[in-house]
Amino acid sequence: KEVILPVPPLQEGDMNHTKGGLVIFTANSHPSSRELGKRIAERLGVELGKVQVYQEANRETRVQIQESVRGKDVFVIQTVSKDVNTTIMEMLIMVYACRTSCARSITGVLPYFPYSKQCKMRKRGSIVSKLIASMMCKAGLTHLITMDLHQKEIQGFFNIPVDNLRASPFLLQYIQEEIPDYRNAVIVAKSPSSAKRAQSFAERLRLGLAVIHGEAQDAESDQVDGRHSPPTVKTTGAIHPSMEIPLLIPKEKPPITVVGDVGGRIAIIVDDIIDDVDSFVAAAETLKERGAYKIFIMATHGILSSDAPRFIEESAIDEVVVTNTIPHELQKLQCPKIKTVDISMILSEAIRRIHNGESMSYLFRNIGVDD
């Protein structure tokens, strides 16, 4: 005789019970870093999962999951705190704990991917972001949600699906709604390397474009790539004189110039990361000398390390607008010029779509290859 088991009712907080349920954890031991996770959970109408993440007396990280995750879709939200290495270990241990607890899937939500600037070979260094990606996959991550990777090629370091969301719609909305007379603005790239991003903003806002050229070379330049080490000892007869390898002519920094008209206009500098603000302060001074009467900086990730808030406060910059991919409440107290744009809406929508098996293409509409 066939036995029909009763179907349990849908539980409150489950977005899709047939998929096994949704659990959202925050892997941060620092209270300020858990704020983004709370915002996302509120938008999804669920409560944050019960977990303890803390540092022991010997500075080891310990994670204790306090509810069942068996057969569930787990999303681990991790924002980068001041101690980035502890942040990474918390994430790895949390993911591995969920894996050993038989979670159905484990999706990491890292709005800012740590070590993303170290994604190229530097002399005798290493590609650290590739190492971090390998560690996360090895720990048991099955999917990654991030935002505005420093280099899009970082997605290729993973052997799992990666959704690289964009913060530009929120920053563009801020420009249109919060900057009076933005039609009299010009979008500025503080270096030729960020010209593509600036061009994307300029085309969407129907504004002019300016590029600052000739600033001091940064760590992204070819000059420090370190692939031209000469032999230590010159051997005779090993290479025929007519077959000597030609040397590349070294680069020389040209005088600082601004390609584009900024006189009598609002200058809006756009970039993906603002950390060491020296280059931004120098760009603001250059734009002031060229006649710009207001200077805004728009960036996705506001790391704002060390004395960055003080330098911004004392500079010609009128306002710095960043998203809450990284907690920076302390920096805002030190510098009232820093403003925040909330991006929890797009992260919560990405989580909802992945959990329900829906297409993610809606979140990437009108986004080109260069955006």
Image (cartoon, rainbow, N blue to C red):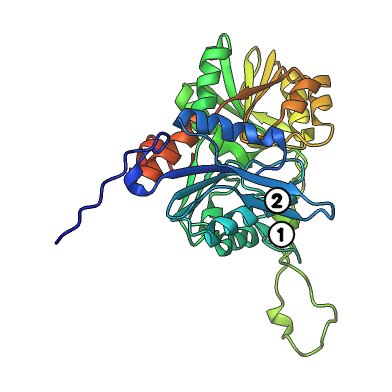
Q: Is residue 259 visible in the rendered structure shown here?
A: yes
Residue placed furthest toward the left: 1
Q: Quadrant of the N terminus?
A: bottom left
Residue placed furthest toward the top: 180
Give the residue type that dot 2 points to.
Ser
Identify the disc placed on residue 221.
2
Residue at 52% of width from left, 13% of height from top? Answer: 177
Number of on-image labels: 2
251, 317: nearer the viewer: 317
Residue 224: % across, % down: 75, 56
Give the residue pinned by disc 1.
Answer: 225
Mark 2 lies on a secondary structure that is loop
Give the residue type that dot 1 points to.
Asp
- Would you identify the image quadrant in which residue 329 lies? top right
Residue placed furthest toward the bottom: 237
Badge 2: how crowded within 10 Å, few (<14), some, or many (20+)? Answer: few
| Marks 2 and 1 in Cβ contact (< 8 Å) | yes
Q: Is residue 304 left or right of residue 159?
A: right
Q: Where 242 sits versus 195, above or below?
A: below
